[in-house]
Image (cartoon, rainbow, N blue to C red):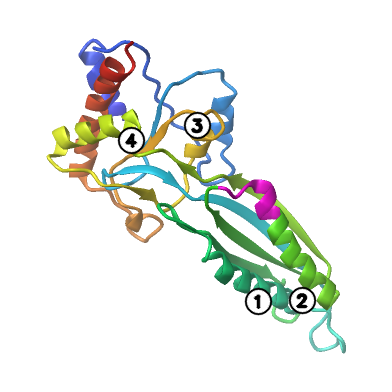
């Protein structure tokens, strides 16, 4: 994107309007950078996010909710305590119930974005091998489909957890520290058609229009602001979070061509009355 912007500047910015490049921090945390950007007062008509799509066009993705569930025990020496109150053991029925909920959620399917999901993705508990665990914490990753809201997802999860708590007499604490809704742009939108032409001219390939498997910051634009948003970039999600991440240089070069062509086409052809 930076290379494309430099090229457009060298060409004298042959388009009306304004091109804004925004490179932010904390995208995989709590979106601190994006939240700051949205308070900056910058307005926009369109947005493109450069997540890795293998230079295909992604028009949306499932949403994500992140939850932290904690159970409590009483610490003590493992050789001395006769009736241990073990926080890890107390967590077990919650994990089993959440697994069952996750299996049910797979039936909640969106024809383009895929099914809803729930995964217990992390477990933390205990302080030493010879100490009864005082706390146990699990992280819950919940992927949402259009129509599911922050409130409905939280209520469904809370109902399941409350049921376990009441049947086992185990107290808990639940924290929802992240929620991004699902997003989906109509494939007939002019933004999609312009991007198709730019990719075809730059790479001689017909780009596939598909869903983005992961979640990114598109909903801050598309849902919160109503700004049509695409996800297009070099590299593959298959290389994300592995030992040796890489992006093919050929795709990086092609992406610069695509972005530069796209800006000119969009602002000269679509944005003008």
In the image: residue 225, left or right of residue 194: right
- Alpha carbon of mark 1 to alpha carbon of mark 3: how far? 36 Å
Q: Secondary structure at mark 4?
A: loop
Task: Residue 173: give x, y in percent of width and height.
Answer: 78, 60
Front-lying residue, 65 or 184: 184
Quarter holding the N terminus is: top left
Q: Is residue 224 left or right of residue 250?
A: right
First-in-chain label (1 vs 3):
1
The residue lying toward the viewer, choosing from 165 and 74, is 165
The reply to whether residue 70 is visible in this rendering is no
Helix or strand or loop: what does disc 2 sit on?
helix
Q: Position of residue 199 (x, y in %)?
A: 21, 36
- The prevailing secondary structure element of the residues shown in magenta is helix
Closest to the observer, 196 or 30: 196
Q: Label 2 to label 4, Cα distance in Å?
A: 51 Å
- Residue drawn at (60%, 72%) of the image: 99
Residue annotated with mark 2: 90
Residue at mark 4 to residue at mark 1: CA–CA distance? 43 Å
Q: What residue is at 35 percent from the left and 32 percent from the top?
A: 189
SS type, badge 3: helix
CB under 8 Å between callouts 4 and 3?
no
Q: Nearer the viewer, mark 2 or mark 3?
A: 3
Q: Are marks 2 and 4 in contact (CB under 8 Å)?
A: no
Q: CA distance from mark 2 to mark 1?
A: 11 Å
Instruction: Locate residue 131: give its quadrant.
Output: bottom right
| Secondary structure under the numbered disc 1 in the rendered image | helix
- For label 3, the residue is 221
According to the picture, the residue beneath numbered tag 1 turns out to be 96
């Amino acid at each position: 994107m930076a290379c494309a912007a430099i090229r457009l500047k060298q060409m004298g910015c042959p388009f009306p309007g304004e091109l804004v490049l925004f490179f932010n921090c904390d995208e995989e945390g709590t979106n601190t950078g994006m939240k700051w950007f949205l308070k900056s007062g910058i307005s926009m008509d369109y947005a493109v996010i450069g997540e890795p799509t293998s230079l295909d066009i992604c028009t949306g993705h499932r949403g994500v909710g992140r939850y932290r569930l904690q159970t409590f025990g009483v610490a003590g020496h493992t050789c001395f305590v006769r009736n241990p109150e073990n926080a890890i053991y107390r967590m077990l029925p919650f994990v089993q119930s959440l697994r069952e909920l996750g299996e049910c959620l797979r039936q909640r399917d969106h024809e383009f974005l895929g099914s809803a999901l729930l995964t217990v993705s992390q477990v933390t508990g205990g302080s030493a091998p010879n100490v009864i665990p005082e706390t146990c914490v699990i992280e819950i990753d919940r992927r949402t489909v259009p129509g599911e809201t922050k409130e409905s997802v939280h209520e469904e999860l809370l109902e399941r957890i409350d049921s376990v708590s009441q049947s086992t007499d185990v107290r808990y604490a639940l924290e929802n520290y992240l929620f991004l809704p699902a997003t989906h742009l109509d494939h007939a939108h002019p933004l999609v058609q312009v991007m198709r032409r730019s990719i075809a001219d730059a790479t001689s390939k017909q780009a596939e229009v598909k869903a983005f498997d992961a979640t990114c910051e598109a909903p801050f634009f598309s849902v919160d602001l109503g700004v049509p948003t695409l996800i297009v970039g070099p590299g593959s999600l298959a290389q994300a979070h592995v030992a040796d991440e890489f992006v093919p240089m050929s795709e990086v070069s092609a992406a610069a061509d695509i972005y530069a062509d796209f800006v000119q086409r969009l602002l000269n052809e679509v944005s003008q009355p």
